Image (cartoon, rainbow, N blue to C red):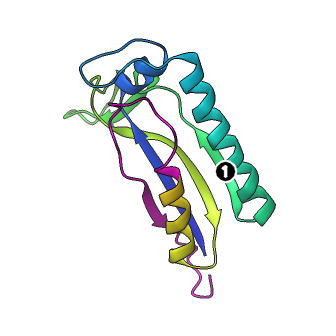
Amino acid sequence: MKYLMMVQAAQADYDAMGGRASGHSPAWNEKELRAMFAFMEELNDELTDSGELVDTRALVEPARTRLVDLGPDGRARIAEDPYGPTEVVMAGYWVLDCESPERVTEIAERVLRCPVPEGSPEYPVVIRPIDTGRPDE
C-alpha cells in the first residue's frame, strides 16, 4: 500500500534553520544543519535500498507560498505569503510503498528522532494512505 508521510514546520522554523532565532524556535548552527541533512540522507538511502521510497521532497518556506481562492464576487484572489511566522504547514513529504501501516509507522517514529537543536518545536509526523481507487491496492 502507498502512503503519504508528511513533516510539518512554520516559517519561524525555516528562519531558525537560516540562523535567525525567535521565541518559537532557536537558531540552528551549521553543525546542526549538517546533522539533520545527514540523518535525512541516510533514511532516504535506506528507503531507496529497501524499495519502499517512491518519492520524497522538501518544500520551500511558507513565505514563498501563494494561496489562490475565490472572492465573494467569484473572481480569483491571490495572497502571497498567507501564513504567519508560527502557523504550521507541510514542510516536506515522502511517498512510501510499505507492506503495512505498522511499517510506515516505524519509519515515522524514526523521522521523529531527527536531530534538531534543543528547544526546537516538536511536530507530529502525519501518515495518510493514498487512495488508488482500486480495491486491490
Which region is colored magenta?
111-137
| Outermost bottom residue | 136
- Whole-percent x and y of residue 130? 53, 68
| Outermost top residue | 20
Check disc 1 and give the amino acid type.
Answer: Leu
Q: Quadrant of residue 76?
A: top left
| Outermost left residue | 72
> Residue 94, relative to residue 116: is it above or below?
below
Q: Is residue 98 left or right of residue 78?
A: right
Whether residue 133 is in magenta: the answer is yes
Q: Which residue is mark 1?
A: 43
* Rendered residue at 57%/72% (across/down): 103
Q: Provide the major secondary structure of the magenta segment.
A: loop
Between 75 and 44, the one lying in front of the other is 44
Q: Label 1's element?
A: helix
- Whole-percent x and y of residue 56? 64, 48
Whether residue 110 is in magenta: the answer is no
* Rendered residue at 32%/30% (across/down): 119
Q: Quadrant of residue 70?
A: top left
* Rendered residue at 62%/81% (across/down): 137
> Residue 96, relative to residue 40: is it above or below?
below
Q: Is residue 1 left or right of residue 14?
A: right
* Rendered residue at 77%/65% (across/down): 51
- Whole-percent x and y of residue 21? 35, 15
